[in-house]
Image (cartoon, rainbow, N blue to C red):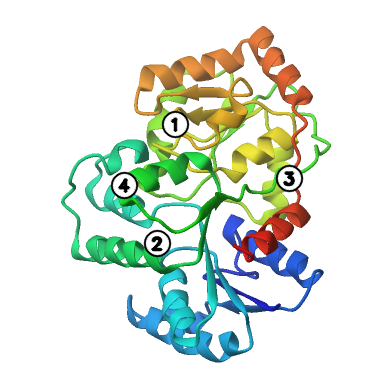
Amino acid sequence: MTILIATGIYPPQVGGPAKYAQKLYEELGRRGPVGLCAWSGLERSLPWGIRHMVYFVRLVPKAIRADTILALDTWSVGFPALLVARLLRKKLLVRIGGDFVWEAYIERTGDMVRLSEFYKQPRRLSFKERLIQRATLVLLAHSDVLLFNTAWQMRIWQDAFAYKTPARVLENEYPAKKQAADFPLGQKIFVAAGRGIRYKNIPAFAEAFAKAAAGRAELDTRALPPAEHAARNAAAYAYAVPSVSEVNSNNIIEALSYNKPFIAPLDCGMRERLEGLGVFVDTLDQAAMCGAVEELLDEQKYQAYVARIKAFSYVHTWGQIADEILEATKV
């Protein structure tokens, strides 16, 4: 069986989705024939909508030789992959690890609504947002298998869209523990790096951090090249993911791998597994975020978190992820 991976990002592009696509390509390639169709510079240079049509045209000849298409998102590649899969009668698996409509709505309006509450009442969506939502509904109805990276988002989308397509959870990688670096003498650095978009809520957290830390710690929000990013994070005191909501955070997973505590939103898909290993807080409440920073600056409480994280031994490898995808193709 040949699997074709459809992805909107792949190295040399950087970031979690690019790494995810690369690792899957490598692991699935160890198990059998695998193809890849990633967005090129051409798609990224074209206007919205036209880029999806161009990607569709590029995807067709590669999909002819495949048995299954694995789309790594719902919109950039998911909808074009659906059209190709139905045209060529191929099986389609769609990985769902975020929510394009929710993110776009917050970015456009500034209405910091939690993902768990977003679909519970009507929203004044833009034309683009309505189009993406309708395309998503079609994708959910006509795919063969849906792969959510948290059960939390799977429940939110089931309640919102009432899809009948088989769905299962495909968690992200949880690596084995790494060797953390000592944080610089006399420095306690909280890392809160992320895309500079509204739902990430970095400015509000930075304001709360300044009040709570009062010079006792530093906050680093820089986006760094991979090598510098890894060195900085290994030496961090703690991590912060202050998003309005967070489906799944690679930064939290990285924090765990270094035995470092973290701050995360209550509205989070990882909370069920990781409760007690970090401070889950209402990230729309500045006082609550101040309290979370103060809690981790308390040495006794900090060390209690570290001890619990050291006892956390869950590992989910790329090999296991690849095997779970192959199992899903049998549905």
Which numbered tag is attached to residue 165? none
Task: Give the label, 1 or 2, closer to the camera.
Answer: 2
**Would you name the residue on which mark 2 appears?**
140
**Would you name the residue on which mark 3 appears?**
316
**Residue 260 horizontal/vertical position (percent):** 69, 28
**Residue 22 horizontal/vertical position (percent):** 68, 66
Q: Secondary structure at mark 1?
A: helix
**Would you name the residue on which mark 1 appears?**
206
Q: Amino acid at mark 4?
A: Ala
User: Quadrant location of the C terminus?
Assistant: bottom right
Foreground residue among 59 and 235: 59
Q: Residues within 10 Å of mark 2 (few under 14, many from 20)?
A: many
Q: Secondary structure at mark 3?
A: loop
Counting residues from the N terminus, which is met first, the one under dot 3 or under dot 2? Answer: 2
Instruction: Say which residue appears at 59% left-offset and 24% top-offset.
Output: 278
Counting residues from the N terminus, which is met first, the one under dot 1 or under dot 4? Answer: 4
Counting residues from the N terminus, which is met first, the one under dot 1 or under dot 2? Answer: 2
Counting residues from the N terminus, which is met first, the one under dot 4 or under dot 3? Answer: 4
Question: In the orientation shown, which residue stands out farthest toward the bottom?
Answer: 61
Q: Residues within 10 Å of mark 4 (few under 14, many from 20)?
A: some
Q: Quadrant of residue 61?
A: bottom right
Foreground residue among 49 and 324: 324
Counting residues from the N terminus, which is met first, the one under dot 3 or under dot 1? Answer: 1
Measured Cα–Cα span from mark 1 to mark 2: 38 Å
